[in-house]
Amino acid sequence: METNAAYKFEPIWVSVLSITALVMSYNFLKGFIARPSYDVPGLIFMSAPLVLSLLFLPMGVKMLLGIPAITFTHDQLIDNVFGIKIDWENVQNVRLSGSRKPFLTIDLKDTDKFYSSINNPLKRIAIRMLFALSPGDASVNLAFVAGDNHAIVAVTQVYWEKHYQPNI
């Protein structure tokens, strides 16, 4: 019996964003090497494509390697979009939110426990800032995940109920 379920990355969306981020970073880096500028506005403007590259290129690489965007196991939801793991025992509620930009929204029982499980302090800060802008305590942007949004939320709820809720 299969105990894990997985959803792949959305190939078109992730490919376009990865290639765009790569081209933008290359052009900005090429321009910076040709004419270096160390003023604050220039460095801020320069950092935007690099941040996009740090966000989208890993998704593109994971997609090419066949790593799923979301994996459901008996004890946790693994989000490879942002590289986080959420234990089912820490989940309070799961729902679909947003219409134009759909999110798998997860309300947590203990947000401090979730953030302390992220080992890299820079990643912890970035995830905290990102989730402050999104609904719920944690969320997965379903635009990067292939599949029907409602089906993904339904499978998430089934895994949560099957592997955690009965043990309450």
Image (cartoon, rainbow, N blue to C red):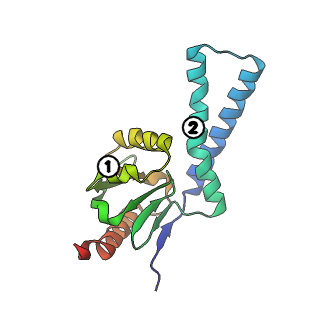
In the picture as drawn, the residue positioned furthest to the bottom comes out as 1
In the displayed structure image, the side of residue 31 where residue 61 appears, left or right:
left
Q: Amino acid at mark 2?
A: Leu
In the picture as drawn, the residue positioned furthest to the top comes out as 39
In the displayed structure image, the side of residue 101 where residue 145 appears, left or right:
right
Which residue in the protein does label 2 denote? Answer: 52
Q: CA distance from mark 2 to mark 1?
A: 27 Å
Q: Residue 102, can we see it?
A: no
Q: Residue at x 61, y 34 (%)?
A: 50
**Which is more N-terminal, label 1 or label 2?**
2
Q: How far across and how far down the image is residue 154, in percent? A: 34, 68
Mark 1 element type: helix
Mark 2 element type: helix
Mark sitting on residue 112: 1
Q: How far across and how far down the image is residue 13, in percent? A: 56, 50
Q: Quadrant of the C terminus?
A: bottom left
User: Which image quadrant is residue 34 in?
Assistant: top right
Q: Residue at x 61, y 25 (%)?
A: 46
